[in-house]
Image (spheres, rainbow, N blue to C red):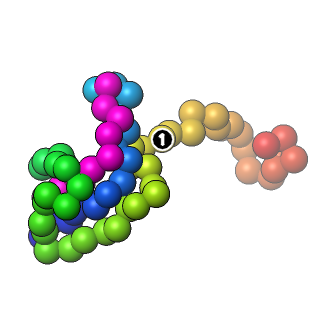
Amino acid sequence: MSLVIKGGRLLDPSQGLDIRGDLLVEGGRIAALGAPGSLTADEVFQAEGLVVCPGFIDLHCHLREPGFEEKE
């Protein structure tokens, strides 16, 4: 199964990437980048006006005993 994320702002600071285009995902991995409207797939997600970027991780966590919700 393949998925195309169409027309989003493709942003990846680690690669110096900041373009508008399509992103093809096959087998859970990025297979290709292309100009808007250039890629096809089984499933399409319209991302006009959205940012497509690597996942963000919240590194702020507290590892405490349960019951101290007020400290969070």
On the image, the x and y values in percent for residue 15 come to: 28, 26
Query: What is the x, y in percent for residue 8?
Result: 36, 54
Relative to 18, is 71 on the left or the right? right
Say left or right for 2 vs 61: left
Which residue range is magenta in the image? Answer: 16-26
Crowd class of label 1 (few under 14; some 14 to 19; many from 20; radius 10 Å):
few
Relative to residue 54, is residue 1 drawn left or right? left
Identify residue type, mark 1.
Phe
Q: Quadrant of the C terminus?
A: top right
Query: Can you say whether 17 is above or below 48 in the image?
Result: above
| Res 18 → quadrant | top left
**Can I make out residue 25 in this image?**
no
The residue drawn where x is 31% and y is 32% is 17
- Nearest the camera: 57 or 30? 30
Q: Classify residue 40 by image quadrant.
A: bottom left
The number of discs equals: 1
Q: Nearer the viewer, residue 11 or 70?
A: 11
The residue pinned by badge 1 equals 56
Looking at the figure, which quarter contains the N terminus?
A: bottom left
Residue found 81% across the figure and 50% down from its top: 69
Q: Is residue 21 magenta?
A: yes
Query: Does any portion of residue 9 appear in the rendered image?
Result: yes
